């Protein structure tokens, strides 16, 4: 029983790592944008790459947090182009 749990955990970790590597590879293809996309809360315009990340990783919450706290933290200002570095 312990062995099957370990196998399941290792397989899950391998799948996560594979998906992560694929997503990073996809994101590396974005060097500009052809269109802008509204954030869920409506206050941000996202580039194609940010939109792809939001859709592919299902991380709408992350964009919402950045939008909610961006002005408070001084990282985003109205009517300007801003960037947020994670990590």
Image (cartoon, helix red, strand yellow):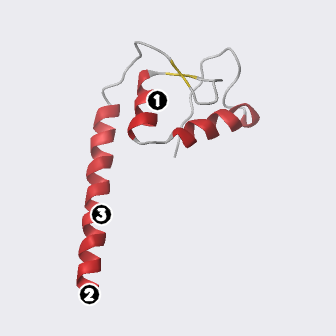
Left or right for 29, reference 51: left
Left or right of 39, for residue 12: left
Q: Earlier in the sequence, mark 2 or mark 3?
A: 2
Q: Kindly indicate the quadrant of the structure image that contains residue 7.
A: bottom left
Callout 2 environment at 10 Å: few (<14), some (14 to 19), or many (20+)? few
Do residues under tags 2 and 1 come within 8 Å of each other at their CB atoms?
no
In percent of width and height, residue 59 lies at: 49, 42
Q: Position of residue 17 (x, y in %)?
A: 30, 54
The residue at 31%/71% (across/down) is 9
Q: Residues within 10 Å of mark 1 (few under 14, many from 20)?
A: some
For the residue pair 22 and 60, the one nearer the viewer reads as 60
Residue 43 quadrant? top right
Residue 1, label in figure: 2
Q: Earlier in the sequence, mark 3 or mark 1?
A: 3
Residue 73, quarter of picture: top right
Name the outermost residue toward the right: 72
User: Picture coordinates of residue 33 (x, y %)?
Assistant: 41, 16
- Taking the spot 26% from the left edge, 87% from the top edge, the residue there is 1
Q: Which residue is mark 3?
A: 12
Helix, strand or loop under label 2: loop
- Residue hosting label 1: 50
| Apparent side of residue 57 relative to residue 5 in the rendered image (left or right) | right
Residue beneath the point at 53% across and 38% down: 60
């Amino acid at each position: 029983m312990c062995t099957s749990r370990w196998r399941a955990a290792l397989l899950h970790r391998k799948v996560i790592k594979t998906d992560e590597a694929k997503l990073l590879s996809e994101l590396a293809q974005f060097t500009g944008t052809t269109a802008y996309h509204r954030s869920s809360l409506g206050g941000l315009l996202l580039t194609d790459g940010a939109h792809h990340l939001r859709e592919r990783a299902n991380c709408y919450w992350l964009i919402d947090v950045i939008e909610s706290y961006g002005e408070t933290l001084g990282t985003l200002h109205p009517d300007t182009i801003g960037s947020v570095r994670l990590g």
